Amino acid sequence: MQTQTMLHPRIFYGWFVVAAAFAVTFVGFGCAYTFSAFLEPLQREFGASRGSTSLVFSLAGFLYFALGVVSGPLADRFGSRPLAVIGMLLTAVGLAAASRAQSLVQVDLAYGLGIGLGVGAAYVPAIGAVQRWFVRQRGFASGLAVAGIGLGNLVMPLLASWLIGAFGWRSAYVVLAAIALTLGGGLALLIENDPGDRGLAPDGDAPAGGRGSRISGGVAVGDAIRSRRFIGLYVSCLICSFGAFVPFVHLVPYAKDHGVEAGTAVLLLGLIGVGSTAGRFFLGGLADRLGRERALLMVLIGMALATLIWVVSTTARSLAVFAFIYGVFYGGWVAVLPSVVMDYFGGRNVSGIIGVLYTSVAFGTLIGPTATGFAYDASHSYVLAILLSAAASLVAAAIVGAACVRR
């Protein structure tokens, strides 16, 4: 079959949609994952405990995953672009407001609501749009799109740490707000919902009869969420998420507790980003060849095994090994999951279905990092929380294997 690139020398527009989604995830999650760099400055500024300060991240995480249940269906109906642009604007406003906070409660409201509502409005619509533009390369394209999360996790915490050291945490938030407004908001304008709107077919294939292929087939949201496979995915994501985001909040303070200097500790968070980016590229493409549902099972087991490395790591070198390996499998999980949803339920309501699915991640994100922080305040140890995180990923893998994977 001829492809569009053979008929026309231009780049298939689906890759511009991927680039826009990459920018949205880079900015949105990059700003969210800078929180570990802000944890100690906020503790010092407001005299707060580690558990109560961790709540800021958990609130934002809960909102940006939970809001997909609203933004996803809206994107299916009205298009992904306006939701993504509004999300980036909300992110910028929240960061700017956090720079003016006079109490931890005000940081909770500004950062938590700004990042939470902003990323929540943009993430699911952007990722849902990418799924419609590809079939054969769906896993790879999805991996590229969410690689922005991994690269953002590498670049943005390092940038935030430098800004905090040079100008203070308030000025750091102002700079991040400017990045969200210009880079995130600007590139979000490239997002389009459907290749048929441009007279194109998925993957850059020649349109049948010279006309674009609109994505019309797919399961209704209500039917999808009652299916065995969706329920299995939902419960799996819920359980996995209790531990999946703990390293993003607590790895830096854990490393400092074990004598790792502050600059190196922040680099460990960046290594999760490096591994995550590699995992999204490599495992997303590998999933297209091995089968995306089996790849999902593989990455969940990998996350569990990687987390066990953390529990025995006390030096910068061993923590670096953990951070990279964990990042690879975490990145694979984030890349493969939306593609599995598209494979199971089709494209007509994919954003809405992903949005409902991600409410499970919202509850796990709200509870896991915060509970870990309070557990540390009580015991001055992370060991139990890390072991429970590993167990959660194993249980999640068992659920996927039982409820979803074809035999």
Image (cartoon, rainbow, N blue to C red):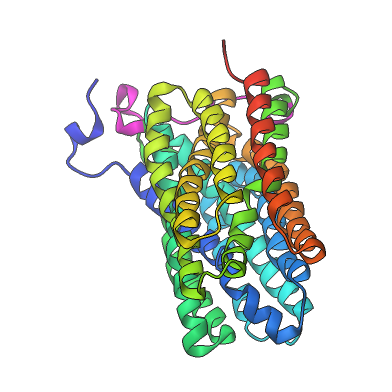
Judged from this view, the residue extending furthest toward the right is 378
Q: Is residue 164 above or below residue 406?
A: below
Q: Is residue 211 magenta?
A: yes
- Which quarter of the figure is the C terminus placed in? top right
Query: Residue 134's spot in the image, x, y percent?
Result: 40, 33
Q: Main secondary structure of the magenta part?
A: loop
Query: Residue 167's spot in the image, x, y percent?
Result: 50, 89
How many discs mark residues in the rendered view?
A: 0
Seen at 43% across and 47% down, the residue is: 145
Seen at 70% across and 79% down, the residue is: 43
Left of 336 or right of it: where is 289?
Answer: left
Q: Is residue 147 above or below residue 31?
A: above
Seen at 24% across and 29% down, the residue is: 3
One can see residue 212 in this view: no
Frontmost residue, 186 versus 399: 399
Seen at 55% across and 68% down, the residue is: 34
Q: Is residue 372 magenta?
A: no
Query: Residue 266's spot in the image, x, y percent?
Result: 50, 68
State the extent of the magenta-drawn residues as a range: 203-222
The image quarter containing residue 205 is top left
Q: Is residue 45 above or below residue 330?
A: below
Query: Residue 50's spot in the image, x, y percent?
Result: 73, 70
- Which quarter of the figure is the N terminus placed in? top left
One can see residue 233 in this view: yes
Q: Is residue 356 above or below residue 269?
A: above
Frontmost residue, 352 versus 95: 95
